[in-house]
Amino acid sequence: MRATEASQVTQQCGVLRHSEIKRLLEAQGLIENADPQCIQPASYDVRVGKLYWLPGGKEIHTLDERGIIEVPPQGVVMIQSVERFHLPPNIVGHTGPRRHLALRLMELRDSGAQIDPGYEAHLFSVLRNASADVQHLGYSQPYATVEFKYTTSAKPKEGGCGKG
């Protein structure tokens, strides 16, 4: 979906559910390179893409489909998502950590970051290894989750949010 097509989306309130995320993926292209298995009950799991950068290095690295990123203890890595997002003008996203990484002490440094309406690009995220062990991230491994919400900038349905 391109941002201009968003006006045809029925306005709702709250976090988008699985069925609505799936509908927006299929009908309007909310996320390019999306994997339907990454749609959760109220979010979409973002996956490690091909580009990453480790501090101290001056080059961007490319990860092949069987590649692994090694993040040293207390180290950080910036990664690009597999997915390219196409948020319409009436939808906003917020990022959050994946629990399985948090349990391994991998912190999503930009957790809670807002993805603005109209955003059309890959996500770039910073992960920090807060553990004493080397941590591994594989290509296409989920590392973050995005929760989507409708904004109140468009006129809500009768009785919907924003009425008051």
Image (tube, grey):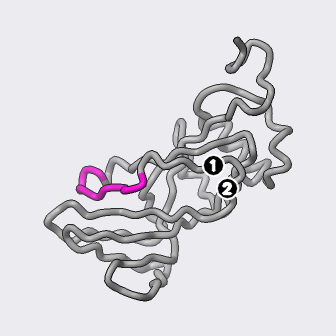
Q: Which residue is at 72% across, 42% downward?
A: 23
Q: Which residue is mark 1?
A: 116
Q: Which residues are magenta?
A: 102-110
78 to 36, vertically: above or below: below
Q: Is residue 101 left or right of residue 51?
A: left
User: Was residue 109 drawn as part of the magenta stretch in this picture?
Assistant: yes
Q: Are marks 2 and 1 in contact (CB under 8 Å)?
A: yes
Q: Circle 1 — which element?
A: loop
The total of numbered circles placed on residues is: 2
Q: Which residue is at 70% across, 55% downward?
A: 86
Give the image location of residue 66, x and y in percent.
44, 79
Between 135 and 157, the one lying in front of the other is: 157
Give the image location of residue 139, x and y in percent.
45, 72
Q: Is residue 155 left or right of residue 126?
A: right
Between 75 and 34, the one lying in front of the other is: 75
User: Was residue 28 drawn as part of the magenta stretch in this picture?
Assistant: no
Q: Circle 2 — which element?
A: loop
140 to 86, vertically: above or below: below
- The kind of residue on which mark 2 rests is Tyr
- The kind of residue on which mark 1 rests is Asp
98 to 157, vertically: above or below: below
Q: Which residue is mark 2?
A: 119
Res 164 quadrant in image = top right
Q: CA distance from mark 2 to mark 1?
A: 6 Å
